[in-house]
Structure formats: structure tokens, C-alpha cells
Amino acid sequence: MIQAGTELTGLEKASVLLMSLGSDASEEVLKRLSPEERDLLGAQIVRMRSVKSIVRERSLTNASSRLPQVSRAPRAESLEDFL
């Protein structure tokens, strides 16, 4: 379990975000990723198991603060473009 106060890697942040989305939204995200990226995220989610609510909240706040920047940017070609 990821503890509060732990600095997350990009892969961990992406995993927290994916775990926080509903199944339909998660499926849409996964469709846009390569098989290798899906494998990486899946393995990370299994390793994390669960996330403290404060960590989830911090990750979601961080992601939402970046949305205006992302929406004006060209379409990402891979997961690495966001990490």
C-alpha cells in the first residue's frame, strides 16, 4: 500500500488515476495504450493493491490541475507523454 507522504512515480500516478476512474472510463484509457503500457499499468496496480484516500486525492488533484494544459496540447502518442 502506498502511504501518505510518499512521492509517487509517473507510473504510480497513472495507476492511481486509472484505479480511480470508473470501469467505462478506464476501458477508454486502456484502449489508447500499447499492450506494453497496459501490462506496465496492470502490474503496477497489482503491486499497489490499495491506495490511501489522501494519496488518491493528491494524485487526482495533481492530474486535474494539468488538464487545461493537456487539453491544448497535441494528442499524446503514448503513456510516457503524460508522465
Image (cartoon, helix red, strand yellow):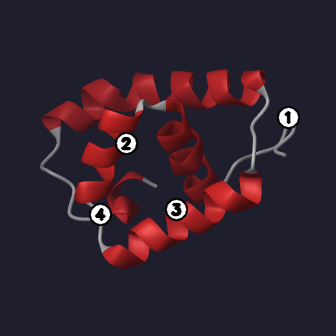
| x and y, in percent, of residue 14 in the image | 51, 48
Residue highlighted by disc 3: 41
Q: Is residue 15 above or below residue 58?
A: below
Residue highlighted by disc 1: 5
Closer to the observer: label 4 or label 1? 4
Nearest to N terminus: mark 2 or mark 4: 2
The disc placed on residue 26 is 2
- Residues tagged 3 and 4 counted as in contact (Cβ below 8 A): yes
Residue highlighted by disc 4: 33
SS label for mark 4:
loop
The disc placed on residue 82 is none
Closer to the observer: label 3 or label 1? 3
SS label for mark 2:
helix
| Classed neighbour count for the residue bearing mark 2: other residues with Cα under 10 Å, few (<14), some (14–19), many (≥20) | some
Q: CA distance from mark 2 to mark 1?
A: 26 Å
| Classed neighbour count for the residue bearing mark 4: other residues with Cα under 10 Å, few (<14), some (14–19), many (≥20) | some
Q: CA distance from mark 2 to mark 3?
A: 11 Å
